[in-house]
Amino acid sequence: MHKSIFFKQIFADRWFIWFISISIFVAVALFGYIQHSLVEMGSTAYRGDRTVSRMENSIHVNSPVPNQVVRSPFNIFGEAKGTWFFEASFPIKFLDDDGNVIKIAIATAQSDWMTEDFVPFTSRVDFSVGGSVRGKVVFQKDNPSGLPENDYSYSVPVVFSSE
């Protein structure tokens, strides 16, 4: 009788250990798959009134700030990882809420851009709008290859004003 209780306990413990082992394996594999899928999909989320993407940690925009009233001429500045630049520049688009282009400008690196570190950038933009127009400033990672997997952007909502 004593032997059978001993074997039942060992058998139960093995099933429990097997169940826990498989559960941990599935959880780790599922987490890795979800993380990979989010990176492949671009993992864009929203925080308050600004778009937050996987590229947020590779560009810091000091001007404009979210929902700022922007008047022409306007100075843009911040810093981006060197990988955002090609030949020391990357494009910036001013778009209205319907996606119409108000202006396309160029951000210019202010120091050596051939690095993976942050590089300061600036741009001075002249534009014209009638009255006040809600829209966004879109910072686009330069993509000379044209490959969609190398397309990244970061947007800041603003109000364009002629007043």
Image (cartoon, rainbow, N blue to C red):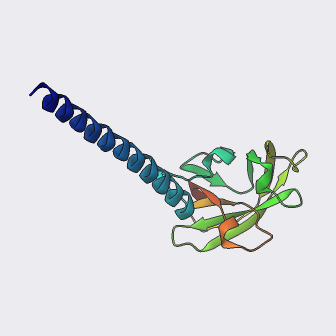
Quadrant assignment for the C terminus = bottom right
In the image: residue 8, left or right of residue 151: left
Q: Position of residue 140 (x, y in %)?
A: 69, 62
Residue 155 visible to the viewer: yes
Figure check: 15 above or below 42: above
In the image: residue 47, left or right of residue 96: left
In the image: residue 80, left or right of residue 130: right
Q: Position of residue 5 (x, y in %)?
A: 14, 29
Q: Quadrant of residue 23?
A: top left
Q: Nearer the viewer, residue 117 or 80?
A: 117
Q: Nearer the viewer, residue 27 or 99?
A: 27
Identify the residue shown where x is 65% and y is 64%.
94
Figure check: 71 above or below 144: above
Q: Nearer the viewer, residue 41 or 7?
A: 7
Identify the residue shown where x is 61% and y is 48%.
56
Residue lying furthest top = 2
